[in-house]
Image (cartoon, helix red, strand yellow):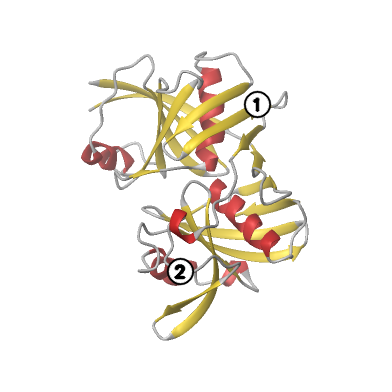
Amino acid sequence: MLLKFTKMHGLGNDFMVIDGVTQNVRLTPEQIKELGDRHFGVGFDQLLLVEPPGDPDMDFRYRIFNADGSEVEQCGNGARCFAQFVRDRKLTASRRIRVQTSKGNIELRVGMDDEVTVDMGRPELEPYEIPFKADRQSITYKLEIEGREHEISAISMGNPHAVLLVDDCKNAPVELLGRKIQRHARFPENCNVGFMEIVNPGEVNLRVYERGVGETLACGTGACAAVVAGRLQGLLEPTVKVTLPGGSLTITWREEDQSVLMTGPATRVYEGHIRI
């Protein structure tokens, strides 16, 4: 099968994006893993698949696969690239795009400057729904790792996140501690792990260790989860600039019963074909 694809990135978080509307696409986890190999395949953090919606009120279905072949529920940087992709491919001319995901529906809005705002929906804080093992909902939790306690926030933005406050994001033990928290028994589906340094109430620095990937240059859902965590602790303003290694996003979350809004760029790198 000859597969047409587009390589894109959102702040360095890179994607292979495939049109499953005009192409018949069936990929196994093994094939996705081969495509994700940066030496022998295309190479990416996630593969994004655009499909026709199952819900008649939606414009598209959005599926996300990690480079290890596993399917995940949500990817904020990918959602921005998704919006730009369907417009570039003329699958829609709308600047307001309604998308079905495995964790619910989201809305994407493309501005006149081509910056994309994603309505990420309301954060899930109930432990059972994240999922996270806890007796009751709390703003923060104590997580024991090798005899030492770490204070985290546990939040779902369509996928599970642990967020830690650190004094120095640049020197945080992202690889070592991120891997251990990601696989902690209290996160039965594993989690993404954010290390957040608060610069001031309107600005944070963030690094994220992602499930099935490792540390990436940017993580949209991680940026959203970090701002939610900081807002719940009374540390951040409603709108926050989140600076990640790959660049900056603007995250807005005003009230607990409101959606989180994420605004940032999406960049097309090249078009390609590959035979699988």
Asked if 275 appears above or below 195 in the picture, the reply is: above
Q: Residue at x 30, y 22 (%)?
A: 3
Q: Residue at x 65, y 60 (%)?
A: 205
Q: Position of residue 77 (x, y in %)?
A: 54, 41
Q: Of helix, strand and loop, which one carries label 2?
A: loop
Name the residue beneath numbered marker 1.
110
- Give the residue at x 57% y 71%: 171
Mark 1 in CB contact with mark 2 (< 8 angstroms): no
Secondary structure of residue under mark 1: strand
Q: Residues within 10 Å of mark 2 (few under 14, many from 20)?
A: some
Q: Quadrant of the N terminus?
A: top left
* Cα separation between marks 1 and 2: 39 Å
Q: Examine the image and state in which quarter residue 111 appears.
A: top right
In percent of width and height, residue 119 lies at 62, 37
Label whose residue precedes the other's in the sequence (1 or 2): 1
Give the label, 1 or 2, closer to the camera: 2
Mark seen at residue 134: 2
Question: In the drawing, does residue 24 fall left or right of residue 97?
Answer: left
- What is the x, y in percent for residue 126? 52, 58
Looking at the image, is 8 positioned above or below residue 152?
above
Q: In front: 236, or 214?
A: 236
Residue 257 coordinates in the image, percent (x, y): 66, 47
- Work out whether residue 262 can be spotted: yes
